[in-house]
Image: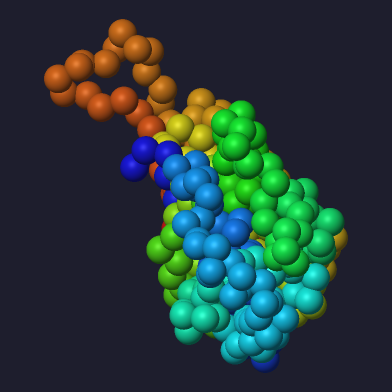
Amino acid sequence: MANWTNASLTVFVPAQHKQDFLDAVKGPNDWRIPVAAQRSLLSFSEEERSGHDRIELIAQREKLESAFRAHPACKDYPEWMPFSMGDAELVLRDEVEGIPETILSIPKINPIADRAEFDRYFPGELTDDYWELTETKNDTKSIVRYFFALGQHGLSLAKLGAHSILFNVRMTEKSAAQDGRVCLHFEFDVKNGSVTCFPAALTPVLQKFDAKALHVWEHNCESGGFDYMDPATDTVLTVVDDFDVIAESVGMEIKEQEDYDEENSEPLHIDWSDVLLYAQQHIKDADFDNLG
């Protein structure tokens, strides 16, 4: 599938810490930000609000913000996160909703750190005591810059590694190891890139629960890589390579272009299992030898 990355994360964790680990990585599948920041390239026109609506929203701002922050769906909304007029309208319409949860949440393990980091991707200011974007006001160049370099795309690229959330996340529990550990095998898809945050964001979680992990990914059958994280041995290893390097390493016979029969031969490509073998050759950790 074009521009999609197939990936897995395999974790060995002591059985007594399994549920605590699962709770630590479960959470929202996206970062919660003000409604005013949730815009696409095609929706940067001014909100259609009447003067009367604005006057009502301004008059009730404090009450609406208190109701918004007290809503169960906003229990993890930081105090420093700004409040926009769009958020207030959700309260008035009783449409405040939580973000869907996933069993492997990048926003949970790699949240927006503070207001300074938020402002880096969502430049804004207060107008009538409501936060609104400033990068996108009546300026096509700024709108394009915001969409591709800042905003939700920029945040996701910086915090996750791709302009995407994780899709189709599923998990299977492998047989327990003889030493009292369990093997949790997550699989997921990512669009337009791969997850790059695991070494920095997941390693502290692994360390807390005496766990270790291997993240393996393959993109478009043309490139792949892995992250191996074992805090007990102070090991974090990241390798990324293209098709030729991985194919040669795992023993594929690479034909010259002129050797292909256009009718009967398909171009050689790598898949997830090839990258897994490539990772196993590098890390030399017997725990991860039987994952294919």
Can residue 24 be seen by looking at this rendering?
Answer: no
Taking depth in this image into account, of 131 and 31 the one nearest to the observer is 131
Can residue 95 be seen by looking at this rendering?
Answer: yes
Coloring applied to the structure: rainbow
Quarter of the figure with residue 288: bottom right
Taking depth in this image into account, of 4 and 18 the one nearest to the observer is 4
Residue 149 in the image, given as x and y percentages of width and height: 64, 38
Residue 50 in the image, given as x and y percentages of width and height: 50, 62
Taking depth in this image into account, of 61 and 159 the one nearest to the observer is 61
Residue 42 in the image, given as x and y percentages of width and height: 45, 42
Q: Residue at x 44, y 60 (%)?
A: 167
Q: How many marks?
A: 0
Q: Residue at x 41, y 22 (%)?
A: 254
Residue lying at the far front in this picture: please name it: 52
Quadrant of image for the N terminus: top left
Q: Residue at x 25, y 27 (%)?
A: 266
**85 horizontally vs 252: left or right:** right
Residue lying at the far top in this picture: please name it: 258
Relative to 237, say whether 258 is above or below: above
